[in-house]
Amino acid sequence: MNKNMLLVILTVVIIGLVVGLVTNDKSVRKSTQEAKNNLETNNNLITKTMKKISPNMMVADVDATVDYYKEKLSFKTVMVVDEAKGDGTSGKPLVWAMLKNGDVEIMFQRKDGFIAELPEMKDKKMGGTFTLYISMTDIKDFYEKIKNEVKIVKELHKTWYGADEFVVKDLNGYIIYFAEAQGE
C-alpha cells in the first residue's frame, strides 16, 4: 500500500469520526471503525512482512572475499556453497557464502553464478553501485584494529550528525561505512 492510499484511509477515518460524533450516527461510526481497522491491518502487514535485509553482493572470487571479511573485518562464516554444490569441504572454489558479524549479515556470490541467476546483471560493474552502512559499538577499537589491514577511504571522524564514522573500500570495490551513534 502506498503513502497516498494510507493518507486517503486516514482522512476517511478522521472525517468519519467527526461526522459520527456530530450526528451521533451509528452507521457512520461503524464505517469509520472498519476503515480504521483496515488501516491498522495494512500497517501491520507492511511492518510484519519484512524482517531484515541481507545484501547479496556480486564478487569475482568468493574465497578471497570470505578470507578478507573474516581476517580484516572480524566476520564469521555462516554458510558456504562450493562448485560441487557442497558445503565448502570439497576443495573446489566457493560460489556463494554468507558471513555474519553481530546482527550484520552479508552474502557474496561469484559473478558467473550471479549472472546465470539474474542475466540483467551481466553488464553491471562490481563495487560502485551502492554502499553499506554498518552501525556498531566500540568503533574506535575496531578502527585501530583494522586501519592498517584495509583500504581506508575516509579516516575516523565525527559526522555533522554526531556519529563517529570511517569508510573502507573492500577488495571488490564496495564501499563500507562503519558508524557508532553518539551515546552508544
Image: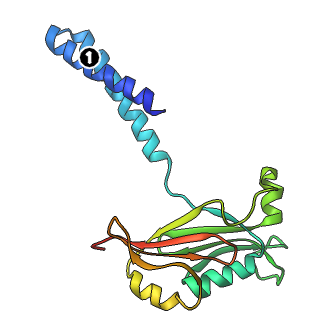
Q: Residue at x 41, y 81 (%)?
A: 139
Tell me: residue 1, above or below residue 135.
Answer: above
Q: Residue at x 73, y 82 (%)?
A: 64
Give the side of residue 45 with respect to residue 182, left or right. Answer: right
Q: Is residue 34 visible?
A: no
Image quadrant in which you'd find residue 130: bottom right
The image position of residue 44, as x and y in percent, is: 40, 40
The image position of residue 98, as x and y in percent, is: 64, 71
Image quadrant in which you'd find residue 18: top left
Q: Residue at x 37, y 30 (%)?
A: 39
Q: Residue at x 45, y 85 (%)?
A: 142
Tell me: residue 3, above or below residue 134.
Answer: above
Tell me: residue 104, above or below residue 36.
Answer: below
Give the side of residue 162 with respect to residue 94, left or right. Answer: left
Q: Which residue is mark 1?
A: 16
Q: Is residue 115 visible?
A: yes
| Residue neighbourhood size for the residue with mark 1, other residues' Cα within 10 Å, grouped as few (<14), some (14–19), many (≥20) | many
**At label 1, which amino acid type do we have?**
Gly
The image position of residue 127, as x and y in percent, is: 68, 67
Image quadrant in which you'd find residue 69: bottom right
Give the side of residue 32 with respect to residue 71, left or right. Answer: left
